[in-house]
Amino acid sequence: MKIVHTVDEVRAKVKEWRTAGLSVGLVPTMGYLHEGHKSLIDRAVAENDKVVVSVFVNPMQFGPTEDLASYPRDLQRDAALCEDAGADLIFNPEPENMYASDFSSFIDMNTLTTGLCGKSRPIHFRGVCTVVGKLFNIVQPDKAYFGQKDAQQLAVIRHMVNDLNFNLEIVGCPIIREEDGLAKSSRNTYLNPEERQAALILSKSLEHGRKLIEAGERNVSVIIKAITDMIETEPLARIDYVEIVDWNTLETVDTITGPVLNAIAVYIGKTRLIDNHIYEEV
C-alpha cells in the first residue's frame, strides 16, 4: 500500500490501473479510522480490483465554532488499518493541495440539506458536496462507499451524483456499533467515561422508537415524543433534533406510510453525536 499527498500522484496511479483494465473503488474519510470505516474498505476491496481511501479533514465543512482544530488525526494508525483491510492507496492531501488560494467554485444543493444536520450546520453540506465532487473527479472511481451513520450525507451524495451525472455507483453500508450499541464515530474519542456511558441513550432511544413502529405506531409525533422523553432522562444529554423524515426526500412527515429515516443529533457534554435507523418496510 502507498500513501500519496498530491492530486497528480493519485491520477498517475489510477491511470496506471485503468490502463491495466482494473476497477477502482473509493472510500472518502476524514481519517481517525475505526471499525465502521474498515467495513467500508472491506466492502470496497471485495467489489473492486483497487481501492483508494482518502484521508482528509475537510476544512470547508466545518463551521467557525466547530471542532476542525481538535478533530482527531493519526495517519500512521489509519495506514495500518487500511493496509490490514487491503486498500491499495491512501490519498492524504494538505488543504492547499485541494483548495488553491483563489479557490471559488462550490457544489451547492437547495434540497435535502436544509433540515436535520443542515439546520445547525448551515455550511456543512456545501463543504461535503464540494470535496466529494472533487474526490470523484480526481479518482474517477467505479464505486464510492459511504456509511449509513451519516444518513443525510448518504442521501445528499446520491442526489448530487444523479443531478450532476457522475459516472459511478454510490454504495451505502450499514452502521457499525460497539457491543453496547453506541454507533462507531471518530468523535467518540472526545467522551470521558461518564459521557461515554451517557451516550448510550442515543441507541436506546432509537431502539425504543423502532419497537413502537414495529408494534404498529404510525403517528410521527407520538414516536418523536417517546424518543425525546427517553433522551431527556439522561442528565448529560442535550437534544439538537429528533426527527422522522421520508427516506427518499428527507421531508418531514406526519404519518408513516413508506420508508422513513428516524434521525437524531444529541450533545453529550460538549460532543455532538448523531445516530439513526432507516425503516424500509413499514
Image (tube, rainbow, N blue to C red):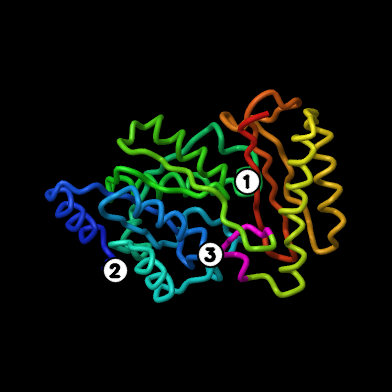
Residue toward you, 177 or 195: 177
Viewer-nearest of discs 2 and 3 = 2
Q: Relative to residue 47, is residue 72 depicted above or below?
A: below
Q: Amino acid at mark 3?
A: Leu
Q: Disc 1 versus disc 3: distance between alpha carbons? A: 17 Å
Q: Which residues are magenta?
A: 181-189
Judged from the image, the secondary structure of the residue bearing numbered disc 2 is strand
Q: Which residue is mark 1?
A: 117
Q: Residue at x 39, y 35 (%)?
A: 161
Q: Is residue 242 magenta?
A: no
The answer to whether residue 195 is left or right of residue 149 is right
Viewer-nearest of discs 1 and 3 = 1
Q: Are marks 2 and 3 in contact (CB under 8 Å)?
A: no
Q: Relative to residue 224, is residue 87 depicted above or below?
A: below
Q: Amino acid at mark 2?
A: Ile
Viewer-nearest of discs 2 and 1 = 2
Q: Position of residue 125 (x, y in %)?
A: 52, 45
Q: Disc 2 versus disc 1: distance between alpha carbons? A: 32 Å
Q: Which residue is mark 2?
A: 3
Residue toward you, 100 or 74: 74
Judged from the image, the secondary structure of the residue bearing numbered disc 1 is helix
The answer to whether residue 188 is left or right of residue 73 is right
Q: Position of residue 5 (x, y in %)?
A: 29, 66
Q: Relative to residue 156, is residue 3 depicted above or below?
A: below
Q: Which residue is mark 3?
A: 68
- Which numbered disc, 1 or 3, marks the residue that appears first in the sequence? 3
Q: Amino acid at mark 1?
A: Cys
